[in-house]
Image (cartoon, rainbow, N blue to C red):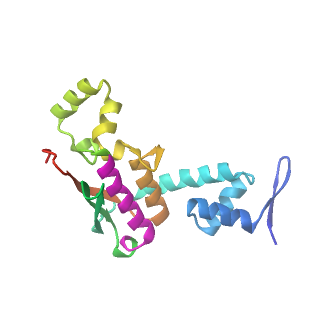
Amino acid sequence: MPDEQRLKGGLVTITTAMIKELRERTGAGIMDAKRALEEAGGDMERAAEILRQQGLARAARKAGRATGQGLVHAYIHGGGRIGALIEVNCETDFVARTDIFKQLVHDLAMQVAATAPRYVSVEDIPPDVLEEGIQEAGSRDKFLQQVVLLAQPFIKDPSKTVEEVIQEAIARLGENIRVRRFARFELGSDEA
């Protein structure tokens, strides 16, 4: 029997089909999806946004936790002309073996191969390089999007940054995740 909640304008019915659809879209648990739908008055988009916000808050709380497990993944593109090697850490080997984590690591390796970032985060950029880069690029944001992996628009969904994609994975998997390091190789390139 569907759950019902009385709202100002009348009665909204939250069905199991609605909960299932929201869970498939967001990866949220049954009760979280139900509560978000109830809070949103049955509005699927608003419920997804509520869950996203809750997930980001959970991810922020996990940021300080140690990440001693994870995966090293290689991605080769263009018939062997470009390759990327990336290490992404999480808290447990259980999460490292999940399909969600493996897909995230693969997508991040593809991001490195496609966009050729030089640093994982802003903190990794030497101050003199940061100043010079901002001068050359014309703005801080533009420079960071060129050289910082976490600041780049995600290649599979440019409306999100790589950091936002990682935060969503943290919320979904319930563990801290961080990109530790990466390397990119391009045939015939002199860059190390």
Q: Which residue is situated farthest in the front direction here? A: 79
Residue displayed at 34% across by 47% down = 150
Q: Where residue 100 appears, x then y in whole percent?
A: 45, 66
Task: Left or right? Give the position of 99 relative to 29.
Answer: left
Q: Where residue 160 appears, x then y in whole percent?
A: 46, 45
- The part of the chain drawn in magenta is 96-114
Q: Where residue 85 appears, x then y in whole percent?
A: 24, 59
Q: Is residue 137 above or below residue 91?
A: above
Q: Which residue is situated farthest in the right direction here? A: 10
Main SS of the magenta part reads: helix
Q: Is residue 133 magenta?
A: no
Q: Quadrant of residue 84?
A: bottom left
The residue nearer to you, when weighing 88 against 123, is: 88
Task: Left or right? Give the position of 23 relative to 103.
Answer: right
Instruction: Identify the image quadrant of the N terminus.
Output: bottom right
The residue nearer to you, when weighing 44 against 105, is: 105
User: Can residue 60 be spotted in the picture?
Assistant: no
Residue displayed at 41% across by 55% down = 166
Residue displayed at 72% across by 51% down = 43
Residue displayed at 49% across by 62% down = 172
